[in-house]
Image (cartoon, rainbow, N blue to C red):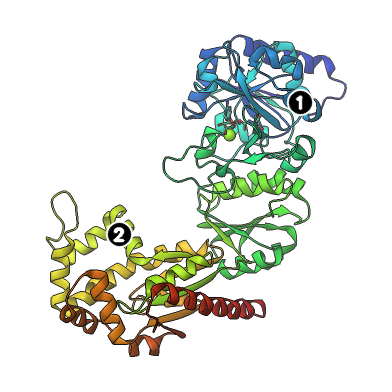
Amino acid sequence: MQTIYYDLRDTKGQQKEIEDKISAAAKILREGGLVGIPTETVYGLGADGCNPDAVRRIFEVKGRPQDNPLILHVTGPQWLPRYCVDISPVAYTLARKFWPGPLTMVLKRQPTVPDVTTAGLDTVGIRCPNHPVTLAILREAGMAIAAPSANTSGRPSCTTAQDVLEDVGGRVDMIVDGGPCTVGVESTVLDLTCEPPRLLRPGGLPVEDIERLIGHIDVDRAVTSSLAAGERPGAPGMKYRHYAPRAPVTVITGAPMNSAREIERRAGPSSGIICFDEFAHLFPEQLVRPLGPSSDKLIQAQRVFEALRGFDSTDVTEILAQCPDNRGLGLAIGNRLKKAAGFHIINADSQRIILGLTGGTGAGKTSALNALRDLGGQVIDCDAVYNEILEGSEEFKNAINVRFPGVFSQDGQLNRKKLGQEVFAKRERLDQLNSIVFHFLVPELERRVEAAEGLYAIDAINLFESGLDRLCDRTVAVTAPTELRVKRVMARDHISEQYARLRISAQKQDEYYRGKCDCELNNASESPEEFRKDARLFFERLIEAVQEEKRHG
Ligand code: TXA
Ligand code: MG
C-alpha cells in the first residue's frame, strides 16, 4: 500500500489546500481506511471507531494484542452520550475543564461501540485531543476516531510524523504531519466507573490537577510497579512492556545530583546515557541524549520517547536513564522510562539497610528475623530463593546435573535426598555444589537488593562462603550457649538429645561466626518471646548506627 503523506505544519496562506487535505483524510476514514493523525500527546493511528473491520486493521498494522482496547477520539463533551452511558457529573466537570487535552476517561459504553474497539470490555476510553488538524478531521468525518498511539506494538510512541512513517509507513493510507507533539507523553487514563476514580495510566495531565478539581483519586498498582505473573492492571495496555528500545534500560531515581553520580559510577564506554542537560558534560566518552533541564518537566516529556528511540540506530549495549521525581508530569515521564526498563530501577539516594544474619541451628536466627520483621524489615530467605531459581532455570539444573548426574528424576524434579547423600559424603563435593549454587544465587540476590528500599535481612547459612556478606551493611552472628541450643533443637524437631548434639557439632561453631561477623547477638534467653524483644532492641541500635554512618558518608 502507498501512504499519502501530508505536511500541514505551515498553514500560512494555503487555507484551501489544507481544507482539501483534511477532507481527504476524513473521506479515507469514512471509507474504512487508516490515517496517522497528530495529537498534542503522541501521534495516533486512526480509523472509524464504530467500523469493526477498520478497527481490526489497526490491530493488524500495529501488531497489537487483541485484548488491548482503543481510545475513541471525539470533538468534545457533547459527543459523550453517543458512545457512553451512565455518564457521571464528574465526567462532565473534567471534560469541561480539561478538554480538549490529554485526559482519557473510561466510562460505560453504548452498545454501538463495537467489541473490537473496547477489546470486549463494557467500558470505553474516550478523549478529545487538542490539535487543530485532528479536531478539524473529526468534525469533517462526523464520527469518533479510534486511535492507539501510532507506534508498532512494543516500540516507543511516535512524537513526529517521521516516527510514524518509520513504524507504519506503507501500511496505512495516509499520514498527516501536524508538527512535533507539544506534550510528548500519552494522555492520562482515568477510570470513572469506580469511586473514587482510579488512575490507570499517568500521562500528559498531572494527577495533582485532577485532584484539585475532583478530590482524591486512587492509583492503579501498574502505574508504579511491575506486575506479578497473572496480575491484571486496570488498563490492559499497562501490562505490556511498552516503549522498549533495543538495548536494556536501567532507570536511576533519586535527587538529580545523586542519580547523576550513580550513572557516572556505572557508565562504561558503550553505555548510552539519558540525563538532564546540566549533567551531560559528565559523559564525554558516551553517547548522550539530554532529557532537558532537571527543572523543566515539559521539555522532558517532549523528549522522553525521542531519547529512548534515539539509541536504536546506535550500537550502545545498555541505556542508563536519569529519572525525574514523581510530581506533576514527572509521574508520566518516570513511568515511561521505568516501563522501558521493565522496572529495572536503582534508587541513588536509597535509604536501604541490609543486614546479613547467620548462625547455627537452635541459636535463635528465626526469632531474630522475626524481630527484624517487627521493625518493618523484609527477610530474604536464601534457601527459598535457591528453590525459586532452581525451579525456573534450566541452566541451573543443567549445571547441577552435569556434576551430579542422576539427581534429577525423569520429570525434572530434584531428588534432594539423593543430592544430600552425594554431597555430605565428601567435603569436596559439597564445595562443588556450593560453588554452582552461589554462581546463580548471588547475582539474583544482588538484583533483588539493588532495587530495594528500607530494611532488609539476608538469611544465609553460607553468608561468607557465598560472598553475600559483601552486599551487607552489617553481618550479625546469632549465637547461643550449646546446652540451650541442644534443648531447643530437641523440642523443635522432636529428636533425641544425642541426635541434637550430633547435628549441632556437625555445623560450624559459634567461634567461627563470632570471628567472621561484624557483631554478635547472643541468645541466652529461656523463651523465644523474651529473645525477640532483646533482639529488637539490639537491631534498633544497630540500625541507628548504620543510618548515622550513611548520613555522614
Ligand atoms: O494520548 C493518547 O492517549 C494517545 C493518542 C493517540 O490519543 N493514544 C494512546 O492510545 O496512547 P494507546 O492505545 O496506545 O493506549 C491506550 C491505553 C491502553 O493502555 C489501554 O489499555 C487503555 O488506554 N484503555 C483504553 N480503553 C480502555 C478501557 N475501556 N478500560 C481500561 N483501559 C483502557
Ligand atoms: Mg500506546
Residue pictured at 33% horizontal, 68% vertical: 439
Q: Is mark 2 within 8 Å of ligand 1?
A: no
- Give how far across and how far down residue 258 sits, in percent: 67, 67
Quadrant of the image occupied by residue 517: bottom left
- Give how far across and how far down residue 156 sits, in percent: 58, 40
Using the image, tell me which numbered label, if any, was put on residue 466: none
In this view, 145 is above or below 267:
above
**Apparent side of residue 384 relative to residue 314 in the rendered image (left or right):** left
Q: Find ligand 2 in the image and state its quadrant.
A: top right
**Apparent side of residue 77 relative to residue 43 in the rendered image (left or right):** right
In this view, 306 is above or below 453:
above
- Give how far across and how far down residue 398 sits, in percent: 22, 59
Q: Is residue 43 visible?
A: yes
Depth check, front residue: 132 or 426: 426
Q: Which residue is mark 1?
A: 95
Q: Residues within 10 Å of mark 1 (few under 14, many from 20)?
A: many
The answer to which of marks 1 and 2 sits earlier in the sequence is 1
- Tag 1 near tag 2, CB within 8 Å: no
Residue pictured at 65% horizontal, 55% vertical: 323
Residue pictured at 63% horizontal, 13% vertical: 28
Please, what is the three-letter code of the amino acid marked with disc 1? Ala
Residue pictured at 28% horizontal, 73% vertical: 435
Depth check, front residue: 317 or 390: 390
Please, what is the three-letter code of the amino acid marked with disc 2? Asn
Q: Count the marks.
A: 2
Distance from label 1 to label 2 (Cα)? 52 Å
SS type, badge 1: helix
Q: Which residue is mark 2?
A: 387
- Give how far across and how far down residue 51 sits, in percent: 56, 12
Quadrant of the image occupied by residue 478: bottom left
**Apparent side of residue 125 relative to residue 510 in the rendered image (left or right):** right
